[in-house]
Image (cartoon, rainbow, N blue to C red):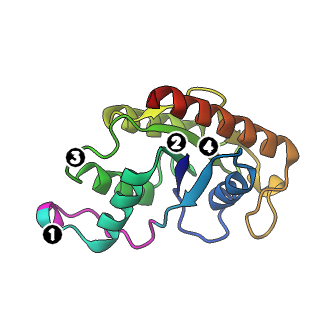
Amino acid sequence: MKILAIAGSLREKSYNRGLVRAARALAPAGMEIIEADISDIPLYNGDDDGDTQPAPVLALAEKVKEADALLFATPEYNYSIPGVLKNAIDWMSRVPGGIFAGKPAAIMGASMGGMGTSRSQYHLRQVLVFLDVHPLNKPEVFVSAAHEKCDDNGDLQDEKTREMIGKQLEALKVWAERLGE
């Protein structure tokens, strides 16, 4: 099973990219997690839409198409989804063929605040519903006080959080298999 992980932060040492690295290490047997790079996705411009979509957009679209499921690791910026993540999703929604439709997905997120990206995750769920993505409902992974649970490189050190990520990945595997029947 191939999972495409998309972190909503461009910063190399971000806590959310650290969550993706942890997920890759914790993936259950039979699951491969591939990290998408959204750093080269240009700002959406309708003039570049249609037959002239930029190469980084088309490359990411191919990865979305090939994935059996999606894993989003989103920070929370101003109570919502980071602009770079929303921009990448907006571009993908413009690729012909509805490449998100029917895809299972899981959402996780880390922040230094006490709510652990709960607001951005709920906003992301709203966007995914419109795109006909099927988000996993439980278990949820909200990592609060991430600066206390990750090292200076953004790598997750907290064992309880690692256990929750493992449980979410197991549930995503079951969810993807169920939807793929």
Question: What amino acid is at disc 3?
Answer: Gly
Q: Which residues are magenta?
A: 38-50
- Measure how far apart labels 4 and 3 are at the Cα level: 27 Å
Number of the front mark, 4 or 3: 3
Amino acid, disc 2: Ser
Residue where numbered disc 1 is placed: 52
Front: mark 2 or 3: 3
Q: Can you identify the residue that label 2 sits on?
A: 120
Per the image, the residue denoted by label 3 is: 97
Q: Is residue 47 visible?
A: no
Q: Nearer the viewer, mark 2 or mark 1?
A: 1
- Residue 115, image x, y percentages: 67, 38
Amino acid at circle 1: Thr
Q: Secondary structure at mark 2?
A: helix
Q: Quadrant of residue 33?
A: bottom right
Residue at point 51%, 56% (across, down): 8
Q: Answer yes or no: do the residues labelled 4 and 1 have beta carbons within 8 Å?
A: no
Provide the secondary structure element on which disc 1 rests: helix
Measured Cα–Cα span from mark 1 to mark 3? 16 Å
| Disc sitting over residue 108 in the figure | 4
Asked whether residue 10 appears in the rendered view, the answer is: yes
Determine the residue positioned at 62% across, 71% down. 12
Give me the disc on residue 121. Answer: none
| Cβ–Cβ under 8 Å for marks 1 and 3 | no
Q: Quadrant of the C terminus?
A: top left
How many numbered marks appear?
4
Q: Secondary structure at mark 3?
A: loop
Q: Residues within 10 Å of mark 2 (few under 14, many from 20)?
A: many
> Which of the marked residues, 4 or 3, is nearer the chain's N terminus?
3
Element type at marker 4?
strand
